Each structure stands twice: as structure tokens, then as C-alpha cells.
Image: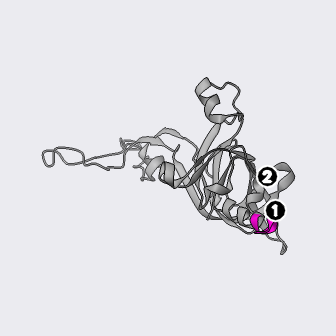
Amino acid sequence: MSEEKKEIEKKNVVTTGGLLGKKVGMTQLFDQTGNVVPVTVLEAGPCTVIQIKTKEKDGYNAIQLGFGFKKKISKPEKGHLKESTSRYLREFKVSDPSQFQVGQQIGVDLFSIGDKIVVSGTSIGKGFQGTIKRHHHHRGPMSHGSKSHRIPGSIGAGTTPGRVYKGRKMAGRMGGDKVTSKNVKVIDVILDKNLLLIKGAVPGKKGNLISLSKG
């Protein structure tokens, strides 16, 4: 097999994996027809291959990628990370793990303009919220004398059933959940700065850890 063919096959295998990055912010671009396209700027990679998992040994084929910098590393972490100082670790399934090596660098060139990718992140936490903000319930009358402005109201009957049904929409913690967006289009790839520009919004705040994979 020629070296060129090996490189092509290696590239095809890499595209089945993924990449870690962080959210830089949002901006807008103009396409060829003059339309404004809102984009999110992501700093994607470079990620280091920390561990390779095979079906024979671990039951599935995957690679573990490391991203970011961690200042203080414990001895167990140092043994696992080898020479890397990665702060975040994530696994991505691959079809042929033999094409990867521990310590290999995977960059933003994994994606191309026009690709449809899957983006996962943690949404912004909003703390403890009431039913109006959390579940879009309607408020009560605001006129003088009303005592039900923003309260949740009745949550069940009395004697029968004598309890609150499970799943009742009530006040509680809002946000801070894992959110996945599919079929997100790649608008531009800036190789020298490891930046990826994708169409639309991305879950989370600036600096949030983002997981990217092929759709």
C-alpha cells in the first residue's frame, strides 16, 4: 500500500472521531450573497491522544483525547497522561483504533467548510427559578387584592389522591444541563489559530468546554 493511500485512509478514520474545544464568543459574517450569518467562534484543539481502547481489550473501539492545560497533576494522573498536561478528557468512538498512537495530535483540520457536525456543551446555569421562568406558566392578576401574582397555585387535590403526583412542574434548579445540537454547519476553519466558525449559537457561556464530532 502506498504512503499516499495510507494517509488518505488515516484521514478517513480520524473523521469518525471528534475534538474538544472551548467557546470563544459570537460574531457575524457576510456570505457571498450579502446575507448576515451569525457564527460562534470555537477554539478547537489541538487535542492529544491519551489512551487507545480496543474491542478485544475494552469491549469497544475508542480513543481518549486530552485538551487544555492543568498546572497541578497528581502522580496517578501523571502516570495516565504520560507527558501530557491535559485538563479535560473525553472519549470518541473510532472504527479502527490501530491508526492512532498515544501522544498523537489532532487539530482543527479534522473538519472542513460545509461539514455538518454535532456540538455538545453545558447550558448556562440560572440557579433556582420559579414556575413562570422555568416552565413558562402564566401569572395571576396583578390588580390590588390579588394574592396569586407569581405563586405556583394548587399542586393537587386533597383527600384523593392525598399526595403530589410525580413529574409535577414546580420550581427548582434551571439550566446547567448537557445540550446537544445536531447538523450544525461549519462556516470557516482558521488553521493557524485553531479556530472553528460554526453557524448559530452553541450551548454554554464563553470559555465553556465544547465537544465536537462528525454528524
Label 1 vs label 2, nearer the camera: 2
36 over 190 or under it: above or below: below
In the rendered image, which residue does mark 2 sit on?
A: 195
Q: Residue at x 73, y 47 (%)?
A: 104
In the rendered image, which residue does mark 1 sit on?
A: 29
What amino acid type should be assigned to the residue bearing mark 1?
Leu
Is residue 5 in the magenta section?
yes
What amino acid type should be assigned to the residue bearing mark 2?
Leu
For numbered disc 1, what is the local secondary structure?
Answer: strand
Q: Are marks 1 and 2 in contact (CB under 8 Å)?
A: no
**Which quadrant does the C terminus fall into?**
bottom right
Q: Position of residue 168 (x, y in %)?
A: 32, 49
Is residue 66 in the magenta section?
no
Q: What span is colored magenta in the figure?
A: 1-6
Report crowding for label 2: few under 14, some 14 to 19, many 20 or more residues within 10 A (C-alpha): many
For numbered disc 2, what is the local secondary structure?
Answer: strand
**Farthest front residue?**
1
Report crowding for label 1: few under 14, some 14 to 19, many 20 or more residues within 10 A (C-alpha): some
